[in-house]
Image: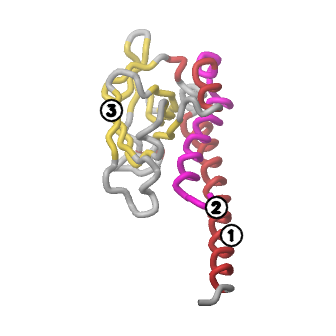
Amino acid sequence: SAECSSIRNLLSGHEMVAASIYRWGSTAVKERWLTAVATGKAIGALALTEAASGSDFDMIDSTVSRRGGYLELCGTKTWISCGLIADVFLVFARFERQHVALLVPREADNVTVEPITRPLVGARASMLATIRFNHVRIEESDLIGGVGFGKVAVGSFALDIGRYIIAWGALSLAKTCMARCLERAGTTR
């Protein structure tokens, strides 16, 4: 953070996914993803933001529905940090009028990752993407925390981690800026 806010941004999204898997993931999810994400062999991205709702859980349009023995995810997330390089997405959606969080592997059928080609200044290195989930088949074990936990438990927990990281990063960046200004002020031409 002291040198690059984009790196801090990438790491915070990844950390929100890793911590959510650790705290709320099923045994199957932990066995598949926890070691890979914790060691950096797999990159995680938090997929909450939507074009019409921003990061407002109550306005999410993405849905999960039951289809026989599995779940099906439909929706589009945008401005997803790390989206271009993520191996797994922690996706927030609605399921039977309740909020859910679920892990979706990038390699799943019907997942499309589109780069955001003109990001805002300061976010250019954040690997921003729009992620489309078009009837993506999900196993029930991929729910993180269970039905109803998406907003009040998993989402709150993950976003708190992100807020702390952003605050620490801002302080670290401010400290670096101050040090560089003092260095510059102490030099003569």
Residue indicated by mark 2: 2
Check residue 20 for magenta coloring. yes
Mark in front: 3 vs 1: 1
Tell me how far mark 3 sits from mark 1, CA to CA: 39 Å
Q: Residue at x 64, y 53 (%)?
A: 165
Mark 1 is on which residue type?
A: Lys
Nearer to the camera, 175 or 167: 175
Q: Earlier in the sequence, mark 3 or mark 1?
A: 3
Q: Residue at x 57, y 28 (%)?
A: 144
Q: Residue at x 47, y 43 (%)?
A: 82
> Could you tell whether 34 is left or right of 134 in the image?
right
Tell me how far mark 3 sits from mark 2, CA to CA: 33 Å
Mark 3 is on which residue type?
A: Thr
Residue stretch in magenta: 1-30
Residue indicated by mark 1: 175
Q: Residue at x 51, y 34 (%)?
A: 90
Asked which quadrant contains residue 147, the reply is top right
Image location (x, y in percent) of residue 60: 41, 42
Say few, some or many: other residues with alpha carbon within 10 Å of mark 3 (under 14 / 14 to 19 / 20 or more).
Answer: some
Q: Main secondary structure of the magenta part?
A: helix
Question: Relative to residue 66, is residue 87 depicted above or below?
Answer: below
Residue indicated by mark 3: 112
Badge 1 marks a residue whose secondary structure is: helix
Image location (x, y in percent) of residue 189: 59, 90
Q: Are marks 2 and 1 in contact (CB under 8 Å)?
A: yes
Nearer to the camera, 4 or 60: 4
Question: Relative to residue 86, is residue 96 depicted above or below?
Answer: above
Q: Earlier in the sequence, mark 3 or mark 2?
A: 2
